[in-house]
Image (cartoon, coloured by chain):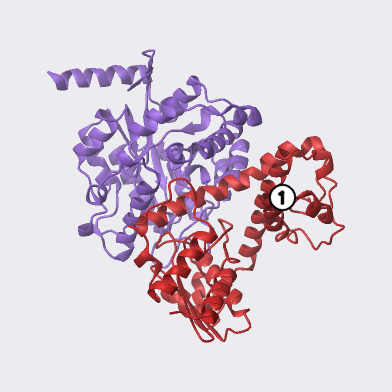
Chain colours: A purple, B red
Amino acid sequence: MYKTKDGEEIFIIDGHTHFWDGSPANQKNIHGAQFIDCFYGYHNALSPKENLWPKDKFDKYSAEQMYNDLFVDGPDDMAILQSTYLTDFYKNGFNTTERNSAMAKKWPNRFILNGAFDPRDGERGLDELDELAAKYNLKGVKLYTAEWRGDSRGYKLSDPWCYKYLERCEKLGIKNIHVHKGPTIIPLDRDAFDVADVDHCATDFPNLNFIVEHCGLPRLDDFCWIAVQETNVYGGLAVVLPFIHSRPGYFAHVLSELLFWLGEDKLLFASDYGIWTPRWLVEKFMAFELPDEVKRETGTDLTLQAKKKILGLNAARLYGIDVEAQKKKLAHAEAVAAE
Amino acid sequence: MMDAVAGRQHHEVLARLARVTDPELDEPVTTLGFITDVAVEGGHVAIRFRLPTYWCAANFAFLMAEDMRREVAALDWVQRVDVTLDDHMYADTINGGIRRGATFHEAFGNDAAADLDELRLTFNRKSFQRRQELLLRALLEAGRAPEMLVRLTVAGLHAACDDEVLGGLAARYLDRRDIPGSFDGGSLAFVDVQGRPLSAADAMRPYLRSLRNVAVNVEFNGALCRGLLAARFNEAQPDDREPTLRDFMLQALSRQTGEGQGHAQDTAPR
């Protein structure tokens, strides 16, 4: 919970977190080592100096550490666990649904657990999705269209097999499709930043929500264009938000464009934990104001109401969280734990 | 000790390399810190480079390697150019391909769906738009009227850019002015990426805003790349400014004259 200096409570849902194992013991090959190194590079490149972690903590952190960083030291009230398999790089996967479920099992009021699918798994994958949805009561999935699989260097959401999976999601009540569209691993000549495939799906699956993680940067213009036409397309601020520290002027431009094209009801806060921690992100975001010149040019403003929506209310709506009831539940759980 | 001829040759190679840009960042590979070593021996030039991550797009890496080789080979005293990419997941494929003069498609076979011409064009268009935006904003800030700018000719642009900063921006822009189509001194200086004249002067602000989105996208990767490069090679980032070509050349020259052929990462501050 974040409290403004006037004492107002801001309910925070962290839209993108991971409980990963990138440690050398779990790495299958050099790609696994280079993948976590690249994440560590992001961490180093955009974190304030006082929030830098040593590499071994970054490789693999404990459940208690994560809980503390998000909810005790950090201001999150809830967090969404996004699953990333990368089984070609890591022996037990990077952060599979099963690994993430340890967090959700331990602190059920705190976490929303999302699964994943890969349309290249064909019929077998559909069965597995059924099982996964039943086992974890999934309301969302995270898709990584640039992931390698054998000889394949990725897929598109508009592939016929992907449509079968999205149809299945609809049937299973998995309403929220988080799609990684942003800085990517291993784009060869396939344009992995391309967001055009989201456009097709959003039109063809009006009952599903498509949350485009990282807002399609570095293809913000294409993303904004699609999002303005499709009412069920949202922007996830993971990786975008940390620029608030090192490049605040740049961040203001990006955010004002997002507010102009998508509006404050369509943006979701995310720390991308463990790449970044939520405390400094939320503190800086709450203190942030758009410069006058940017406001004038786009006619947008980042009001307190907009901040509240972005930090939690929008995600609560997508995931059917009753914020007042959830606050009571969390307060009760805390009181019990303190006894 | 490097003699005067070798020093001049080295300088010429660096100047050619400064013409090679990262396609997405639209910045010279020299100022981005990608070049780690330039060795000149008679007519033989050996260049080593690196990228911010092991995963950086193979097509971009290939394109830059190709451009480096072509630019340096254009010097009349150069007989052979070797370009080597280090620390990249496709280093072997790319280095082998460049060595045999293969196309991207030939080098990567079935993994590569297309050759690089279209990619090059896409990024040249973005580069045109980005350079145009910077120049237009600078001219507006310097008090030039939008009504005048939409009618300005290329020859007139030269005259209007009467100081060093504007002149530099104009030169960079004119370097890409052929993207929408061929031009001469009498052509309009400012056209959109399709070659159409800019509409009425009151539409200048919305037009600039649309161009700025191109820059915003490019900058996202630019800021990340610099940070990732510094983190990867454990090098300090400058606090207050980006290093310039001049910094790089001074550093490279002092390295060559003082320490022979060490890699930049061996001598960079930790």
Provide residue B200's location: percent of width, then percent of height.
83, 39
Give the residue at x 44% y 74%: B257
Total numbered labels placed on residues in the image: 1
Quadrant where the N terminus of chain A sits is top left
Say which quarter of the image contains residue A244. top left
Let me know if residue A297 appears in the view.
yes
- The residue that appears at 44% across and 25% down in the rendered structure is A287
In-image side of A225 versus B110 (left or right): right
Left or right of B113 on screen, residue A125: left
Q: What's the residue type where badge 1 is placed?
A: Asp
User: Badge 1 local density, few (<14 within 10 Å), some, or many (20+)?
Assistant: few
Residue A102 vertical position relative to residue A88 in the rendered view, above or below: above
Q: Nearer the viewer, residue A61 or B157?
A: B157
Note whether residue A233 is visible: no
Q: Is residue B99 above or below residue A262?
A: below
The image shows residue A131 at horizontal and vertical percentages of: 31, 45
Quick one: quadrant of the C terminus of chain A? top left
Q: In the rendered image, which quarter is residue B122 located in?
A: bottom right
Residue A260 position by quadrant: top right
Tell me the subunit letter for badge 1.
B
Q: Position of residue B193 (x, y in %)?
A: 74, 53
Q: Nearer the viewer, residue A156 or A242?
A: A242
Foreground of the two, B64 or B171: B171
Residue in the picture at 15% in, 22% down? A337
**Relative to residue A12, is residue B211 drawn left or right?**
right
| Pointer 1 residue | B163
